[in-house]
Image: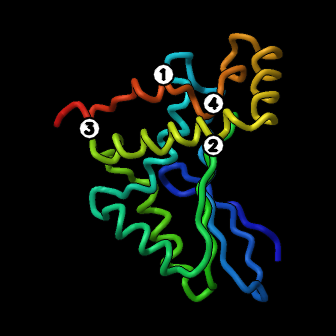
Amino acid sequence: MTPVLETLPGGLRLLLDPDPQAQTVAAGCFVTVGARDEAPGEMGVSHFLEHLMFKGSTRVGAAELNERLDDLGGYSNAFTGEEMTVYHLAALPERCGEVFGTLSELLRPALRPGDIHTERGVILEEIAMYAEQPVTQVMEALHSTYWGRHPLGQSVLGTPKRCRAWTWPASERT
């Protein structure tokens, strides 16, 4: 079958590639925002927001969202890069409607103050973990040297200092 590209009224583009013999259904949301879109004072915000997406929406809390992801019996994850942030899920074909519903809920983060505080700790641990890996140190040094002050010369993860400084309007209201 030939892949089909659909554009919804709100501008969201869907690429559908049906395979009747597939053992799984996969869905991904490719958000065309990454490190290259961040000013120096915003370094790491795309990555921070990626983490916050898994903390639930205003309708579904983090525990329920993650329970839904687990119940699908497949795989879910996300990553942030220089060019985009990607959220992806896979499950059995008979769970297709639930996959899309859960992905839709994931993409409506509540940005609760407590979640921001908790996730800040997780991200600080992630930054520290990667900082200890020689290959990461080399790649970040190469990017910084080649790109200089351009956003592509910055760390996708951000820095501990930037991570500690993040606030969002939702966290400032309470």
* Numbered disc 4: secondary structure: helix
Q: CA distance from mark 1 to mark 4?
A: 17 Å
Given this view, does label 1 or label 4 mark the residue nearer the observer? 1
Question: Which numbered disc, 4 or 3, marks the residue that appears first in the sequence?
Answer: 4
Q: CA distance from mark 3 to mark 1?
A: 21 Å
Q: Which residue is mark 1?
A: 161
* Quarter of the image that includes the N terminus: bottom right
Residue nearer the viewer, 129 or 74: 129
Q: CA distance from mark 4 to mark 3?
A: 23 Å
Question: Which numbered disc, 1 or 4, marks the residue that appears first in the sequence?
Answer: 4
Kind of residue sitting beneath label 2: Thr
Kind of residue sitting beneath label 1: Lys
Question: Which numbered disc, 2 or 1, marks the residue that appears first in the sequence?
Answer: 2
* Quarter of the image that includes the C terminus: top left
Q: Residue 126: x percent and y percent?
A: 57, 42
Q: Which residue is mark 4?
A: 35
Q: Which residue is mark 3?
A: 170
Q: Is residue 138 above or below residue 84?
A: above
**Side of 173 relative to 82 (left or right):** left
Kind of residue sitting beneath label 4: Ala
* Numbered disc 3: secondary structure: helix
Kind of residue sitting beneath label 3: Ala
| Labelled pair 3, 2 in contact (Cβ < 8 Å) | no
Furthest toward the top, the residue is 149
Q: Residue at x 67, y 38 (%)?
A: 130
Q: Which residue is mark 2?
A: 80
